[in-house]
Image (cartoon, rainbow, N blue to C red):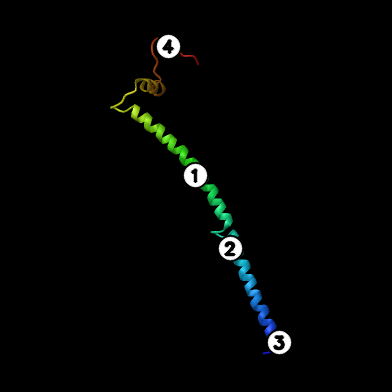
């Protein structure tokens, strides 16, 4: 081997190593499982947790209203409110202002 072949061989190995390192660095930062994607997933996770808490509160409210209208526990005030809202009922002694 000559000195010229050794230099070109070393340069080729260094070039391949550099490009492989650059590729893996890029993939670690911007790839499908990279740092940027991880930050996006964390932000989306926090947003979904807030939405889940809101939905759980709404479900609890609906369960309470459902229980209050069930046969075993009848809330007359809620029944009156629902009848007025859905059916548009009024008592004889009430005045409606629009």
Contact? badges 3 and 2 (CB < 8 Å) = no
Q: For the residue labelled by badge 3, is the local secondary structure a helix, a strand or a loop?
A: helix
Residue 5 placement, left or right of 96? right
Q: CA distance from mark 1 to mark 4?
A: 46 Å
Mark 1 Cα-neighbour bin, 10 Å: few <14, some 14–19, many ≥20: few
Mark 4 Cα-neighbour bin, 10 Å: few <14, some 14–19, many ≥20: few
Residue marked by disc 2: 27
Percent of width and height locating residue 77: 37, 20
Q: Quadrant of residue 15?
A: bottom right
Mark 3 Cα-neighbour bin, 10 Å: few <14, some 14–19, many ≥20: few
Q: Which numbered disc, 3 or 2, marks the residue that appears first in the sequence?
A: 3
Q: Residue furthest bottom?
A: 1
Q: Which numbered disc, 4 or 2, marks the residue that appears first in the sequence?
A: 2
Q: Residue at x 60, y 59 (%)?
A: 29
Residue marked by disc 3: 3
Residue marked by disc 1: 48
Q: Residue at x 41, y 22 (%)?
A: 85
User: Which label belongs to residue 58?
Assistant: none
Residue 19 placement, left or right of 96? right
Residue marked by disc 4: 94
Q: Which numbered disc, 1 or 2, marks the residue that appears first in the sequence?
A: 2
Q: Residue furthest left?
A: 72
Percent of width and height locating residue 32: 54, 59
């Amino acid at each position: 081997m000559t000195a010229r072949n050794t230099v070109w061989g070393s340069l080729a190995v260094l070039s391949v190593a550099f490009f492989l390192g650059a590729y893996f660095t890029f993939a670690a930062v911007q790839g499908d499982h990279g740092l940027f994607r991880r930050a996006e997933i964390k932000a989306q996770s926090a947003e979904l947790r807030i939405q889940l808490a809101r939905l759980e509160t709404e479900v609890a409210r609906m369960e309470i209203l459902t229980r209050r209208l069930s046969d075993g526990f009848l809330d007359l005030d809620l029944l009156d409110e629902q009848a007025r809202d859905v059916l548009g009922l009024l008592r004889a002694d009430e005045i409606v202002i629009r």
